[in-house]
Image (tube, helix red, strand yellow):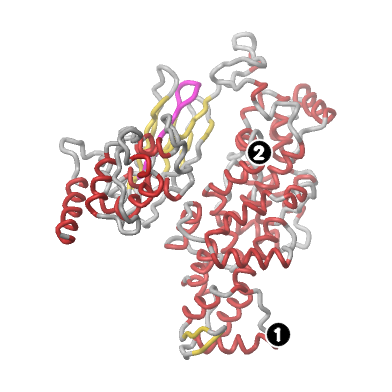
Amino acid sequence: MRAAVTLLLIAAAVVLAAPEKGRSTSSPPPASPDLLYFAAEVAADLQVHCAGCHSDAETAGGLLLELFEDPSKPAPERVLRNFRASLRFVDMREPRRSPLLRKAGGEMGHGGGAVFSATAKAYDRLLYFALGATAKNLPPDAFARDRVRGSVGSEIRLDGSLSGDPDDDEVAYEWRVVDGPPGHDAALRGADGETAVFVPDRPGRYQVELKVHDGKLWSMPVRIAVEVPRTPDWTAGAAHDPPPRAGTDRADAAPIERDPLRSARVRPDRVRLLRRLCYDVLQRGPRVSELRAWLPLSHEETVDTLLRGDEAWLTWYEDQLYYFLLLDRFRPKEGPLTKLPRKLSMDQISVPRAVETIVRSQFFNARNPGNDTFITVVLEQCMGMTVQERRNVRTLELGKKMYDGYRTRIWREEGDSQADFVRIVFGQRGAFEHLIRRSYRSFLGSRIDKKQLKAEAQRLQQDPMAFKAMLRDWLVSPEYVAGAERPREKTEIPFVRALFVDLLDRLPTYDELRNVRNAFLSLADPTPLRLVVGRVLLESNEMVVPDSAIEPRRFVREQFLRLLGRPPADEELEIYIEALRSDPKVTARLVIWALVSSVEYQTY
């Protein structure tokens, strides 16, 4: 009987995975939900959360599931019935709009409320099921900035290069324009590349969609809002419309009283806290668009938004490479290590495991050749030990023996290889404590209390995936909020990253960052060189002059908020506005340069 049921399951899976007839092969069709994935990943969730109500025809709402007698041993026949019942509530064309997911998320008037939150693992499994995931292949992930800005006729670069696949498969890209102003005929070039060029032909709002395909499955689409405002020349005379008044609802201009950056009630402490958070998590200042999006949020909501993003974990990853000195020729340019940021943002790997993966890599091994160097660096950088201390000499010698292939016992664990030594180190409480200690200092700028360190290390050792929650706790703590009132000096890397984002609206390449950082580090006082680099970027062709430069009051206010983390004082505001209006030599670039070259800009 069991063999027959197994054959039935496999046969059903094959039939359901077959492509639909008559569909064009130019764009792969969406994959059908997979029975074996359902049995392994989804059935138990539905059993625990849904079957209690949905086994009764009166309360099933159309989705009738069969209860299992023993949830730990689901009967294959009933799994198959529940799979067939669930299929009717899956929309393969728009998986996230599937009734199965919308009901689970509490939409569509679901009587039981939300079953899973959108960030829960069970919700992800349900979404993967709708996307056609199998036991051997998960759907890829599309990623692009959710909002960009441009002007009519200009080329707007849309970047999907951070898209990827959890199984490390190569992905193909598909961009398309899905919405725009009436009568538009906007051009989209490179629709099958990781970057595309969009050229709007009318002012208004556009929607561009990106999906990626790993050869078997499509990702969820992501939508990029492209804003193309009207930017008339106010000095050209009456032929142009006047600037919009406060409270207008023109489609291409946000009402002034709804824009948090224009409000006179912007709280300086909130701006400082948001800027501190951006520097601590992303090692750069916030963009105007980010200030506008995040200021209305609570501090906790902003923290959650940042920690969900890929950039936070890409920044963390680069920081770890710098910590372990995996620079220049030792820096990985491709391969498994470069996938770590994406996996971290998707909770597919824990932070301790990611650090261990870096230490196990060929790049770390090449950077630290030989038993003495390798064992010393691991003990010092992963355990916080000083190997020259008398009490640690024995551990160093035993580690070198294990590295050389001798069967050796360290911390009551045996091993006879380099890999064994790394495994043993990352299983010790000391490794968790050192990771917490250096992470806490990095984000909060102070030492962690010994009692808190002990509790946090125990928590992380029991559940390595708890690091994100732990980091969130630190960033929303009263200590962190109070610390935002005390300026911290920008070290070389955050300063360079901030300068590129603030002036060129992009992060520096690795070579740009390395060259400028090394130049700064070679000087006892890098301040003069910082000003030189800032001036070079400001006068380059890449310099981005904000759209708001046509409105002096709005422009000055926005630049103070994003560059200095505070609104301008009334006197400062009026001086800058008067200079912009009356002196032809005072340009938007000069205003930005005055702020970037100030003493205030050297701190955050």
Lateral position of residue 189 relative to residue 232, left or right: left
SS type, badge 2: loop
At x 48%, y 72%, the residue is 360
Q: How far across and down, in percent of the image, does residue 406 sit?
A: 47, 91
Tell me the SS state at disc 1: loop
Which three-letter amino acid code belongs to the residue tagged 2?
Answer: Ser
Left or right placement of residue 495 versus residue 40 in this view? right
- Separation of marks 2 and 1 at Cα, in angstroms: 47 Å
Observer-nearest residue: 307 or 250?
307
Query: What residue did someone put label 1 on?
Result: 389
The image quadrant that residue 378 belongs to is bottom right
Q: For the point 72% across and 53% down, which residue is it?
A: 490
* Residue 128: mark: none
Residue for point 39% across, 39% down: 101
Q: Where is residue 600 in the image (x, y as percent from the top left)?
A: 79, 45
505 with respect to 485 (left or right): left
Q: Mark 1 belongs to which amino acid?
A: Glu
Magenta segment: 200-212
In this view, 445 is above or below 157: below
**Label 1: few (<14), some or many (≥20) within 10 Å?**
few
Q: Residues within 10 Å of mark 2 (few under 14, many from 20)?
A: few
Residue ID for mark 2: 298
Between 427 and 458, the one lying in front of the other is 458
> Residue 273 or 128: which is nearer the viewer?
128
> What is the x, y in percent for residue 538?
66, 41
> In the image, 118: left or right of 91?
right
Residue 343, position as x, y percentages in the image: 46, 56
Q: Does the magenta stretch include residue 114?
A: no
Q: Quadrant of the N terminus?
A: bottom left
